[in-house]
Image (cartoon, rainbow, N blue to C red):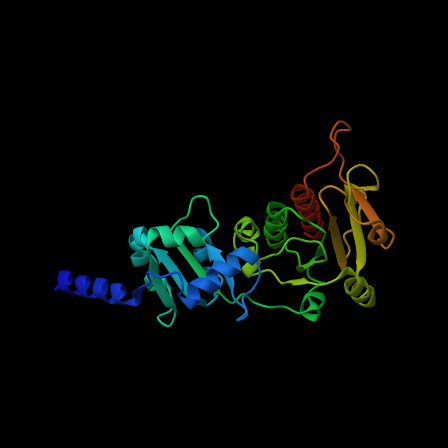
Amino acid sequence: MKQDAKAARTRSRADRLRPVAGRHNQRLKELRLAFRRAELTAQGECAIEGGKLLDEALRSGLHLESVFFSESARPLAEKLLPQINARTETLVLPNALFNSIVPSDAPQGVAALLKPPAFSSTQLLDCSGEGPLVVAAGLQDPGNLGTILRSAEAFGAAGIFLTEGTVSAYNLKVLRGSAGSIFRLPWLRIPSTELIPLLRAHGVRLLATSSHQGTPLPQISWTLPLAIFIGNEGAGLSRELRSQMDETVAIPQSAQVESLNAGVTASIVLYEAARNRK
């Protein structure tokens, strides 16, 4: 009886996996375009790839619109299907077709389209009394942005604003680097010309980061509301933005080191802010 029940469950799961052999399938076109552009589709969906990221999306309570498996990943599909909503479209592709669509050098055999949560500036600012806000101002390295998103959630930031020149949050390297924080942490893309007046109107203090010049990290007041600005990896904050900051924090470091990685800088400052709040 147990063997019959197990066989029935296996058949039921297999029935949910719809084979797709042609690259002209509309959902495949949308997946390919979402990966290529690193932006939302016309339906407001983003593309993710890999078992870890899929697990994080499910753990974050997000609904997967479509899930794509490679033929060789059928064992993985059998494992994941019980966690995937029955209304979610699940497709199986030939290995070569799947690998041609995902941008990964070492595809893991699973990708998905999902609708990420959307947040407003009001939602982020309303939380500014609970933790610092982070502003990614011109960050271009997706690994750095992913790290900052992860550290921001880990150390209790209220949210993160992405200004002009910052890499897309839907870049696959950003999504992976965030380790799922992108699905839970409030964030919003907004021009700095709109953001600064909003922060000022809400009484938010603006804090820049610097390699060697400014108030030493241990002497900074972490009184909220506060926004921590992280600038471009090479040039830092623009001159215009620097002129609008209330204070600059300097992380003590060896004079032989020109600067810290942007993701490391943000993580240190966010940790210090969290430590002082506690």
Residue 113 seen in render = no
Residue 28 x/y as whole percent: 43, 62
In depth, the one of 132 and 17 nearer the eye is: 17
The relative height of residue 174 versus residue 124 in the rendered view (above or below) is above
Residue 153 seen in render = yes
**Res 82 quadrant in image:** bottom left
Residue at image position (72%, 66%) is: 125
Residue 241 x/y as whole percent: 82, 53
Q: Is residue 103 left or right of residue 223?
A: left
Residue 60 x/y as whole percent: 49, 62
**Res 3 quadrant in image:** bottom left
Q: Is residue 160 left or right of residue 104?
A: right
The relative height of residue 18 versus residue 210 in the rendered view (above or below) is below
Residue 136 x/y as whole percent: 70, 53
**Res 38 quadrant in image:** bottom right
Residue at image position (66%, 60%) is: 159
State how many labels appear: 0
